[in-house]
Amino acid sequence: NAGVTQTPKFRVLKTGQSMTLLCAQDMNHEYMYWYRQDPGMGLRLIHYSVGEGTTAKGEVPDGYNVSRLKKQNFLLGLESAAPSQTSVYFCASRVTNTGELFFGEGSRLTVL
Amino acid sequence: AQSVTQPDIHITVSEGASLELRCNYSYGATPYLFWYVQSPGQGLQLLLKYFSGDTLVQGIKGFEAEFKRSQSSFNLRKPSVHWSDAAEYFCAVGSGGSYIPTFGRGTSLIVHP
């Protein structure tokens, strides 16, 4: 009954450090998404995947990379973190035909 | 391209009062429409959805929404607001034909006692 699980939930980085956020879903969904949420900006799409082995850029992809090696996992990487990447990151997976999204609880990242 | 507009950034209501949050969309085909709620510090949770059929849909927590094709709207309503309804509300549009669900910028609901 897990749904979408994100790890870690909180992380503090120094500028220039790297890290990876992991998203795991147990609903066998093909589509997965990474969003960032900033005050007053709503949800902005970073990258998405329409199936295992595929990834595509969203609205704000710069500074991020993703991988979808397994259908249930979608990884978001920051190679060299910048203060502008301080945000709350949400992963979501989607029911194929209807577009309904299931969200994780979010990962709060602070870059100093 | 599809788009979603939530005209109200903030809405303030008194507890027990009725509520209507506005959502307008632009979409070429018959849309699938959603309302999500985000409580402080939490992820987004689906409130209700419209795919087809009856244009008045019921959701969780006593919410309902009405799809009006002629107005390209999908407004969210609740007859009597509770203090626990204070949250951020997002309208979204998507369909099987589009890989990218589109969200509005959200409306923050403040409930006064």
Image (cartoon, grey):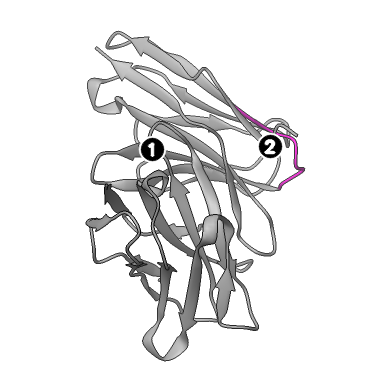
Q: Looking at this view, is B13 or B75 the one in front?
A: B13
Instruction: Say which residue label 2 marks.
Output: A3
**Highlighted range, magenta:** A23-29
Residue at 25% across, 39% down? A39
Residue with the mark numbered 1: A36
Q: Quadrant of residue B51?
A: bottom right
Residue A101 in sight: yes
**Relative to B52, does residue A88 appear above or below in the rendering?**
above
- The stretch drawn in magenta includes residue A107: no
What SS does tag 2 mark? loop
Please tell me if label 2 and label 1 are on a single chain: yes
Whether tag 2 and tag 1 are in contact, CB under 8 A, the answer is no
Q: Is mark 1 on a helix, strand or loop?
A: strand
* Chain containing the residue with disc 2: A
At 75% from the left edge and 35% from the top edge, which residue is drawn?
A26
Residue type, label 2: Gly
**Quadrant containing the N terminus of chain B in the rendered view:** bottom left
Q: What residue type is labelled 1?
A: Arg
Residue at x 71% of width, y 40% of height? A52
Real-space CA distance between mark 2 and mark 1, rounded to the nearest whole angstrom: 19 Å
Is-magenta flag for residue A26?
Answer: yes
